Image (cartoon, grey):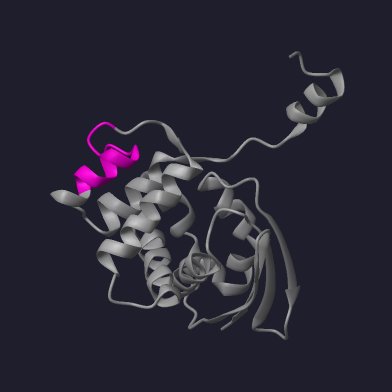
């Protein structure tokens, strides 16, 4: 059965799922977690071969790989803390990749407020131009940030932002205020 012109139009306007650059997976697994043995094999079975990386990966491969890291490396922790640890490890590892160093080198010089303003730029480096970020000041040392993000858990983002803010010479406290299927809201204080 042929699809109608209206159906083709609607299908063609649906946003494509994001693709995650290999530098993000390299940052988490090669540089951050320094995986070996069985975990390397499990990643390969999921679609990420650390020995022969592709340029980028479907976001679903990234999601499965993050779940593997949560389960295998941080399995003794509750979900929220485990995903925060994965996020922190991802940012640490990504900051040591060629692409990540470009962003990380400036963080100590620009400080936490300007680092927060650059979140959309940093997400784009990580292949996530699809995330809309809305930021509202909360005093001089805080931001309420709303992310439209169907693919990441809010705790993963919270952990990544914690580590990013630490690299910007801050002592952050990040609270997940709201979670839903289309995104989440974080309160970031430093």
Q: Is residue 75 above or below residue 139?
A: above
Q: Horizontal and vertical percent for residue 150?
A: 61, 54
* Residue 95 visible (yes or no): no
Viewed as shown, does residue 104 lie left or right of 179? left
Say which residue appears at 32% left-offset and 59% top-offset.
69
* Residue 153 visible (yes or no): yes
Q: Is residue 57 above or below residue 138?
A: above
Q: Which residue is at the front of the view, 35 or 67?
A: 67
Q: Quadrant of residue 117?
A: bottom right
Say which residue appears at 50% left-offset and 70% top-offset.
155
Viewed as shown, does residue 49 lie left or right of 19? left
Say which residue appears at 68% left-offset and 70% top-offset.
145
Q: Horizontal and vertical percent for residue 93?
A: 34, 57
Q: Horizontal and vertical percent for residue 164?
A: 48, 67
In the rendered picture of this protein, how many numbered marks are placed on residues?
0
For the C terminus, the quadrant is bottom right
Q: Which residues are magenta?
A: 40-52
């Amino acid at each position: 059965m042929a699809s109608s012109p209206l159906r083709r139009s609607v299908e063609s306007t649906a946003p494509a799922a994001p693709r995650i650059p290999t530098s993000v997976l390299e940052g988490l697994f090669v540089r951050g977690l320094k995986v070996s043995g069985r975990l390397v094999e499990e990643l390969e079975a999921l679609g990420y071969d650390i020995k022969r990386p592709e340029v980028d990966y479907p976001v679903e491969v990234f999601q499965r790989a993050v779940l593997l890291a949560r389960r295998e490396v941080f399995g003794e922790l509750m979900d929220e803390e485990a995903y925060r640890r994965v996020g922190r490890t991802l940012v640490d590892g990504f900051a040591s990749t060629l692409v990540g160093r470009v962003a990380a080198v400036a963080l100590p010089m620009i400080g936490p407020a300007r680092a927060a303003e650059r979140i959309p730029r940093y997400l784009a480096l990580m292949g996530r131009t699809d995330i809309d970020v809305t930021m509202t000041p909360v005093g001089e040392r805080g931001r309420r940030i709303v992310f439209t993000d169907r693919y990441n858990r809010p705790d993963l983002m919270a952990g990544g932002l914690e580590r990013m803010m630490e690299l910007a010479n801050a002592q952050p406290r990040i609270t997940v205020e709201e979670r839903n299927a289309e995104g989440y809201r974080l309160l970031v204080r430093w």
